[in-house]
Image: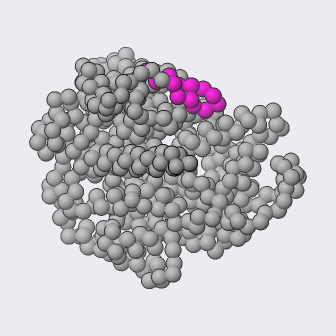
């Protein structure tokens, strides 16, 4: 809920917009307004005319009226658009943008359909279900029963508020429903873990689908993206089983369904999943041109540019650790694996880029890391290109997991977030580039550019998230989260003493 308020409050006229980078060098740790550096780009709203434009102001007022009309003024209704309108009326929020209101309208429509069909969809976890003695009995007696309600697939560019809108929708759903909201990375890790558990059965995917559907009928997957061939080969059959068991999918993604896993290995085997996805979900594009994550103040941050910043990063790391002494540690990840942490203390972990992104690690390792640590110091992020493409993929995943866990990031890098990915292009971008001339050799083309569709599409999201992670608002939210955990821990300690 607070994320919605925070995102839409950034539309106030007094907001400061950030450009492509939010970065500080070791000698530039003062407030942004006093820094004259190419590493900071602060736009004056008066110069952009975005908020001084009368037609823009009039149109946003119209959207508030439009939202009110959609709910027909009914006070007994509930749902994401109704909650949005209530917050605008109470002054908690300012008017939002057209694209978000249109998306909320779709989410409200789905919410209303689900409420009307809750019994038929078996959403209520308290309703008695037919007694089945095990998965085999269920397989013999059950028949395909697609949900009467289609799901929703939301896609759009970075920073358009997809996650915030999904969370607003999910939080309005009745607490007694069988529902689950999970990041796509986490979901696929769970699927592969369950497949390992049921290895040897004739159709382990059907068993996995049965276990997932028992836990949740309404499945909300955030950041749906397919980059791994193992995931691509699993998804088609898995979701055929899930949909046949009545699962309703709500997903957010940066990619349209037809562009998922574009250029991936054995993509022909993945194409039937796209057809199934479009059949079982209403597809809606969020077409906002605003990147809300770049509309933060950017007055603080721990993104340091320069190859010789290692000592400075360690100094800042020690300040955050406090009185503790960092030592080598180990954290457990999935299926009993362990990840070695070079230095860790008081919830803070220190890695070089090579230790965390040049080794064969993945989302499971990064998730395990942030279960034990709330702050990551990462030394030596390089400029990405053809020579370190695999490391770039891991770095993108690392930033996704960092952001999803609301963790704090300190890092040193060879350039700004935008500079890091300047050599990464999609296939279509590469085709649009100027043809070779005599002054551009084939060798320089190969060394300068990395043509990779998944990285090319993911880089904007990563740049945007690096920007927000180093914003004042994000760091304040992180500090509040740590304070709340400290209070909870104190209460637990008191209860233990009393017991």
- Would you say residue 339 sits in the magenta stretch? yes
Q: Which residue shows up at 72% across the image and 33% down it?
A: 196
Q: What stretch is highlighted in magenta?
A: 330-342
Rendered location of residue 276, percent (x, y): 66, 52
Work out whether residue 78 or residue 239 is closer to the camera in this orientation and state it. Answer: 78
User: What type of secondary structure mainly makes up the magenta span?
Assistant: strand
Work out whether residue 178 or residue 238 is closer to the camera in this orientation and state it. Answer: 178
Q: Which residue shows up at 72% across the image and 37% down it?
A: 195
Work out whether residue 442 or residue 341 is closer to the camera in this orientation and state it. Answer: 341
Q: Is residue 395 visible?
A: yes
Asked if 448 appears above or below 19 in the picture, the reply is: above
User: How many numbered discs?
Assistant: 0
Asked if 116 appears above or below 6 in the picture, the reply is: below
Q: Is residue 213 left or right of residue 401?
A: right
Work out whether residue 170 or residue 270 is closer to the camera in this orientation and state it. Answer: 170
Q: Which residue shows up at 88% across the image and 56% down it?
A: 141
Rendered location of residue 376, percent (x, y): 39, 32
Q: Is residue 51 left or right of residue 247?
A: left
- Would you say residue 5 sits in the magenta stretch? no
> Given the current orientation, which residue lies at the most extreme front position?
498
Q: Which residue shows up at 51% across the image and 78% down it?
A: 77
Q: Quadrant of residue 431?
A: top left
Q: Quadrant of residue 298?
A: top left
Rendered location of residue 209, percent (x, y): 72, 48
Asked if 146 appears above or below 338 in the picture, the reply is: below
Q: Considering the image in quadrants, where does the N terminus appear? A: bottom left
Rendered location of residue 226, percent (x, y): 56, 40
């Amino acid at each position: 809920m607070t994320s919605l308020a925070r995102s839409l409050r950034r539309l106030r006229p007094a907001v400061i917009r950030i450009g492509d980078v939010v970065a500080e060098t070791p000698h530039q740790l003062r407030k942004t307004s006093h820094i004259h550096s190419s590493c900071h780009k602060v736009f004056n709203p008066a110069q952009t005319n975005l908020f001084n434009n009368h037609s823009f102001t009039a149109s946003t007022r119209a959207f508030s009226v439009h939202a009110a009309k959609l709910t027909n003024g009914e006070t007994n209704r509930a749902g994401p658009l109704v909650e949005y309108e209530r917050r605008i009326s109470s002054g908690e929020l300012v008017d939002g943008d057209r694209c978000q209101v249109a998306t909320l309208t779709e989410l409200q429509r789905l919410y209303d359909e689900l409420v009307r069909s809750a019994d038929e969809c078996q959403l209520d976890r308290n309703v008695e279900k037919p007694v089945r003695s095990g998965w085999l009995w269920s397989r013999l007696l059950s028949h395909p029963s697609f949900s009467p309600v289609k799901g929703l697939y939301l896609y759009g560019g970075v920073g358009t508020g997809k996650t915030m809108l999904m969370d607003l929708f999910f939080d309005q759903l009745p607490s007694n429903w069988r529902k689950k909201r999970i990041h796509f990375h986490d979901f696929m890790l769970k699927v592969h873990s369950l497949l390992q558990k049921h290895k040897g059965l004739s159709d382990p995917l059907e068993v996995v689908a049965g276990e997932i559907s028992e836990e949740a009928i309404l499945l909300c997957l955030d950041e749906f993206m397919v980059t791994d061939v193992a995931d691509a080969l699993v998804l088609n059959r898995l979701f055929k089983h899930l949909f046949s068991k009545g699962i309703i999918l709500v997903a957010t993604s940066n990619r349209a369904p037809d562009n998922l896993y574009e250029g991936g290995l054995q993509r022909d085997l993945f194409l039937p999943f796209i057809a199934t996805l479009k059949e079982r979900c209403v597809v809606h594009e969020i077409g906002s041109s605003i990147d809300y994550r770049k509309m933060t103040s950017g007055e603080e941050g721990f993104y340091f540019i320069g190859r010789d910043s290692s000592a400075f990063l360690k100094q800042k790391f020690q300040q955050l650790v406090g009185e503790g002494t960092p030592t080598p540690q180990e954290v457990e990840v999935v299926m009993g694996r362990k990840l070695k942490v070079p230095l860790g203390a008081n919830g803070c972990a220190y890695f070089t880029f090579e230790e965390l992104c040049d080794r064969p690690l993945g989302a499971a390792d990064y998730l395990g890391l942030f279960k034990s640590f709330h702050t990551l110091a990462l030394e030596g992020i390089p400029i990405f290109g053809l020579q370190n493409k695999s490391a770039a993929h891991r770095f993108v995943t690392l930033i996704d997991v960092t952001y999803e866990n609301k963790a704090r990031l300190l890092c040193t890098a060879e350039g700004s977030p935008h500079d890091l990915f300047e050599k990464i292009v999609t296939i279509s971008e590469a085709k649009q580039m100027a043809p070779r001339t005599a002054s551009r050799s084939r060798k320089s083309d190969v060394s300068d550019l990395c043509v990779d569709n998944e990285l090319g599409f993911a880089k904007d999201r990563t740049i945007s998230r690096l920007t927000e992670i180093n914003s004042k608002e994000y760091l304040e939210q992180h500090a509040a989260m740590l304070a709340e955990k400290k209070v909870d821990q104190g209460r637990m300690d008191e209860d233990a003493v009393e017991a």
